[in-house]
Amino acid sequence: VFYNDEDDLFKKLRKLVLGESKALPVQTLRNINAHLDWQKRITRFDELFDSIKKLIR
């Protein structure tokens, strides 16, 4: 459930509970957040940490 503020969250949750709206499908939610997957990001973070380490030495 994505929301802008507390009031928006309440309205969206109310609609879900009352059956006035449906939650996004699980796969859609996974796709939305796929770019945050640590397994996909770890190589880039390793490169960044290695470059910082070289600067400190």
Image: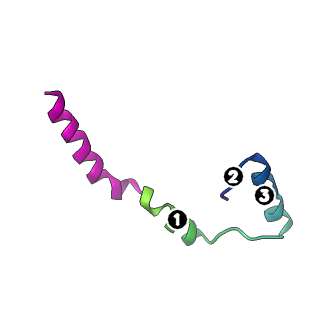
Q: Amino acid at mark 1?
A: Ile
Mark carried by residue 32: 1
**In which quarter of the view is residue 28 placed?**
bottom right
| For residue 46, above or below residue 41 | above
Q: Judge the density around disc 3: few (<14), some (14-19), many (≥20) Cα neighbours within 10 Å.
A: some
Q: Is residue 9 rendered to the left or right of residue 54?
A: right
How far, Cα to Cα, is label 1 from label 2? 17 Å
> Residue sitting at 41 percent across and 57 percent down?
37
> Residue sitting at 74 percent across and 71 percent down?
22
How far, Cα to Cα, is label 2 from label 3? 13 Å
Which residues make up the magenta segment? 37-57
Local secondary structure at mark 2:
loop
Q: Of discs 1 and 2, which sits in the foreground?
A: 2
As for residue 50 lying within the magenta part, the answer is yes
Local secondary structure at mark 1:
helix
Magenta highlight: main SS = helix
> Residue sitting at 83 percent across and 70 percent down?
20
Q: Judge the density around disc 1: few (<14), some (14-19), many (≥20) Cα neighbours within 10 Å.
A: few
Residue 9 percent coordinates (x, y): 75, 53
Residue 43 percent coordinates (x, y): 26, 53
Q: Amino acid at mark 2?
A: Asn
Quadrant into which the N terminus falls: bottom right
**Sequence-wise first label, 2 or 3:** 2
Q: Amino acid at mark 3?
A: Leu
Q: Which residue is mark 3?
A: 13
**Sequence-wise first label, 1 or 2:** 2
Q: Which residue is mark 2?
A: 4
**In which quarter of the view is residue 13 placed?**
bottom right
How far, Cα to Cα, is label 1 from label 3? 20 Å
